[in-house]
Amino acid sequence: MHQSKILGTGHYVPPRVMTNDEIAKMVDTSHQWIVERTGIHQRRIADPKVDIPSEMAYKATLKALEAAKLQPNDIELILFSTTFPDMFFPNTATQLQLKLGITNNCGCLDMNAACTGFMYAFTLADGLIRAGMYKTILVVGAEMTSGFNNWKDRNTCILFGDGAGVAILGRTPAGEKSGVKSHVLSGDATKGEHLMLRGGGAAIPINAENVGTDVQCVVMDGKEVFKAAVKTMASHAEQLLAEGNTSMDQVDWFIPHQANLRIIEAVANRFNFPLERAVVNVDRYANTSSATIPIAMDEAIRDGRIQRGQTLMLTAFGAGMTSGGALLTY
Ligand code: ACO
């Protein structure tokens, strides 16, 4: 059996910065309220004429290929997590294949587990490499949340941002320690109604009556999502540590889903884990859904915080309610 190793990472965020003060001109809120309740100071917003998910993923992947010293044709499979694909079909993974100029007909799969999507794709990639079926897999989280954000709803529009993060997974060379020690994936459909984007699919097609209404936007019960997120991420962290035979003080970096600083603090506090060893960028990018973990991981690798051989804990949660994580040696 092969272990998998993160060969290279990359991220891209669109250049347009939207501040809290700008949002306060659209809805009844303030910079102070948003910072106190979420830790968010600003977010990036994509120009859809330039930066749809496949394009953001393309820009992030070029950086990851360079870091991994690989060529586009080395990729054998693309697992593309997004909640807002370029289009229903062809899938966004194929659009990325096209942009990268891949000519080897590699496999292309879109995945949607909302904000947890990257962890589902990452876990699948790890399993396929362990099984010996693939040697090099591109795992993507790329999101244009501004496409479904309701700019009239102060409960939700303050929370989200756009961006992409990717990781290229390959086989761990013999004699190296890199690899996943434990992983967890879960779903709890009984809490599904707390966070939804209902329209546009088969259940509620967009028609003349409902076009422009909130069926086209995210609707959320923030308090319920908050409670479920803290509970699930904390219990998943416990499971990851137990199954990975690791204690929390052996974790060098905690890379949580970036939804709200208070959620990150609450989970870290349950383990007395110092916040300085949590990778946090929700202040700058807000919640980029399934892109938050690979963006945060890439930033911390590039600025030298994360070093080879260190132990990382990744945990995410999202609509569904889905949740997932991994404990690994980088
Ligand atoms: N500005 C000012 N006031 C606001 C705002 C705002 N932007 N939003 C809500 N309020 C008001 C509410 O209307 C409420 O007023 P009321 O008491 O008169 O009814 C008051 O502030 C308090 O609202 P709460 O819901 O109690 O505020 P809370 O402290 O729970 O914070 C928040 C709200 C930030 C949404 C929080 O619950 C949260 O972050 N939840 C998690 C959300 C999340 O992470 N979603 C993404 C999930 S991941 C995915 O898959 C997409």
Image (spheres, grey):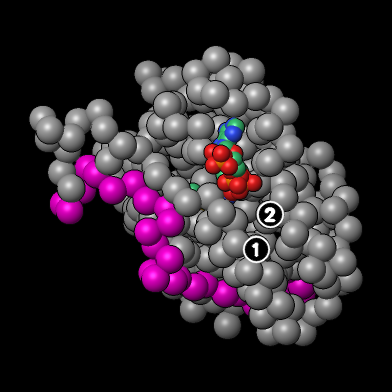
Question: Which is more toward the observer, 220 or 305?
Answer: 220
- Compared to residue 69, the image places residue 273 above or below, namely below
Image quadrant in which you'd find residue 60: top right
Q: Which residue is mark 2?
A: 263
Q: Is residue 58 left or right of residue 165?
A: left
The amino acid at mark 1 is Val
The image's mark for residue 230 is: 1
Of residues 143 and 262, the one drawn nearer to the viewer in this rendering: 262
Q: Which residues are magenta?
A: 174-203
Image coordinates for residue 274, horizontal then vertical, percent: 88, 58
Q: Amino acid at mark 2?
A: Ile
Q: Quadrant of the C terminus?
A: bottom right
Residue 238 image position (x, y, % from top left) = 71, 77
Is label 1 in a helix, a strand or a loop? helix
Ligand 1 within 8 Å of the CB at mark 2: yes
Describe the element under mark 2 as helix, strand or loop: helix
Marks 2 and 1: CB-CB under 8 Å? yes
